[in-house]
Image: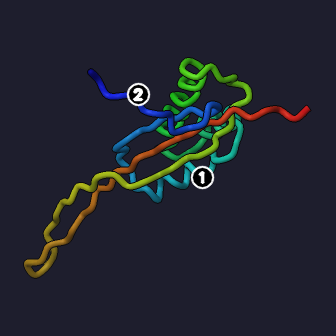
């Protein structure tokens, strides 16, 4: 006896991909994620390919995973996909210490982030 199958959270025309514990702060990652929100998938991939930000390659891999999930798992048309949502949230934070003057200590926070991308199939207007 197993557990009953969990209901799908997303709509039938949506697919999702997550990347957890990316070693960058949420603020920096959100700059790249906000640049692809609402765009067609082909335009978003082009923007990420030629972006000068280091983290753009990780965002691109997550977007490609969402596209593959939409095509293989949910049988959606790749040419009509749009980046519906791109969530960025904080993950763990490593705390390190560095010596400062007069016997004090300075805190260093090494931040990590989570990224969730949802792609949606939209109907082309005739």
| Image position, residue 47 (x, y; %) | 65, 40
Q: Position of residue 54 (x, y in %)?
A: 47, 44
Quadrant showing the C terminus: top right
25 lies left or right of 68? left
Judged left or right of residue 66, residue 83 is: right
Quick one: which residue is furthest to the left in this view? 103
Residue behind mark 2: 5
Identity of the residue furthest to the bottom in this view = 102
Q: At x 14% / y 78%, what residue is drawn?
A: 101
Q: Where residue 72 appears, x then y in whole percent?
A: 56, 18
Q: Secondary structure at mark 2?
A: loop
Residue ranking furthest to the right: 126
Q: Secondary structure at mark 1?
A: helix
At 74% from the left and 35% from the top, the residue drawn is 122
Alpha-carbon distance for marks 1 and 2? Answer: 34 Å
- Which residue is pictured at 71% across the width and 37% down the height? 40
Quarter occupied by residue 31: bottom right
Relative placement, left or right, of 70 versus 111 is: right
Residue at position x 51%, y 50% in the image: 87
Establish if 85 lies above or below 7: below
Instruction: Report the number of numbered marks.
Output: 2
The N terminus appears in which quarter of the rendering?
Answer: top left
Q: In the rendered image of this protein, does residue 37 appear above or below residue 9?
A: below
- Depth check, front residue: 63 or 31: 63
Q: Which residue is mark 1?
A: 34
Relative image position of residue 71 (x, y in whole percent): 60, 21
Q: Which mark is residue 1?
A: none
């Amino acid at each position: 006896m197993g557990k009953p199958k969990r209901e799908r959270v997303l709509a039938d025309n949506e697919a999702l991909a997550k990347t957890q514990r990316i070693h960058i702060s949420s603020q920096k990652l959100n700059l790249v994620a906000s640049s692809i929100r609402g765009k067609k998938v082909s335009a978003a991939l082009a923007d990420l390919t030629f972006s000068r930000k280091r983290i753009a390659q990780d965002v691109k891999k997550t977007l490609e995973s969402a596209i593959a999930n939409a095509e293989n798992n949910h049988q959606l048309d790749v040419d009509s996909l749009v980046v519906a949502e791109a969530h960025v949230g904080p993950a763990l934070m490593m705390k390190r210490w560095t010596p400062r003057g007069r016997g004090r200590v300075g805190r260093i926070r090494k931040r990590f982030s989570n990224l969730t991308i949802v792609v949606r199939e939209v109907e082309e207007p005739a």
